[in-house]
Amino acid sequence: MTNKAANKTAKFKNNNLLEIKNIIELCKINNIKITKRRETIIKAILDLNSNHQHPDTEEIYFHTKKDDESASIATVYRFLAELDEKKIIEKHNFDNNKARYEFSSNSNHHDHLIDIESGEIIEFFNQEIENLKIKIASDYGYKLVDHRLDLKCIKIKK
C-alpha cells in the first residue's frame, strides 16, 4: 500500500466513515476497479455490518443476490480477497472454518467475545485490557503497534 493510500486508510478509520462513497473512494485510491456489481457487494457488507454482524462469504453473496440476481459467489470471493489484500476489510476466522468480514473503517479498535455454542459475536472495548497489552509489550522491551483479541467463551447457565 502506498503512503498516500495508507494515510487515506487511516483517515477513514479515524473518522469512522462508512458511507459507500467513502469505501468506493478508498478502493479507487488502492487501484481497485469498482463496477456496479462490486458496489452491490460493498452495500451488502455495509448492510450486514450495520448490525455488528461479521458476515461470511455466503451471507455476503446471498445478500448481494437480493439486488443483483446474476452475481456469482466466485465474484464475491475474488472481490473480498482483493479488499482484504488492500486492508480495506478485515478477515476474521472466529470459528476456524469460515472467514468473516468487517470493514477496517467499521469502527475504532475493538475486541471480540465469541460464544462458541451459538456463534454470537460481541464487540467490546476495555481500556484496562488495552493498557495491560501496552504494559506487557513494554515489559518485554517492545512497543505495541497492533493486536487482535478474540475471547472464545461459553455462556454461563444460571
Image (cartoon, helix red, strand yellow):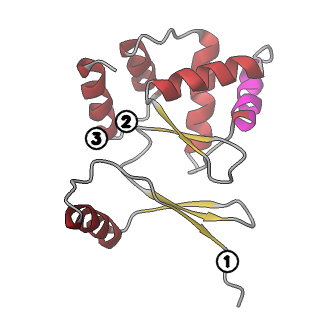
Residue at which label 1 appears: 155
The relative height of residue 140 versus residue 35 in the rendered view (above or below) is below
Residue 4 placement, left or right of 80: left
Q: Main secondary structure of the magenta part?
A: helix
Q: Residue at x 55, y 35 (%)?
A: 46
Residue at which label 2 appears: 17
Comparing marks 1 and 2, which lies closer to the viewer?
1
Indicate yes or no whether the magenta region holds residue 119.
no
Which stretch appears magenta? 58-68
Residue 81 placement, left or right of 32: right
Comparing marks 2 and 3, which lies closer to the viewer?
3
Residue at which label 3 appears: 14
Q: Which amino acid, mark 1? A: Lys
Element on which disc 1 rests? loop
Residue 115: quarter of image = bottom right
Q: Quadrant of the C terminus?
A: bottom right
The relative height of residue 104 versus residue 125 in the rendered view (above or below) is above
The relative height of residue 96 versus residue 72 in the rendered view (above or below) is below
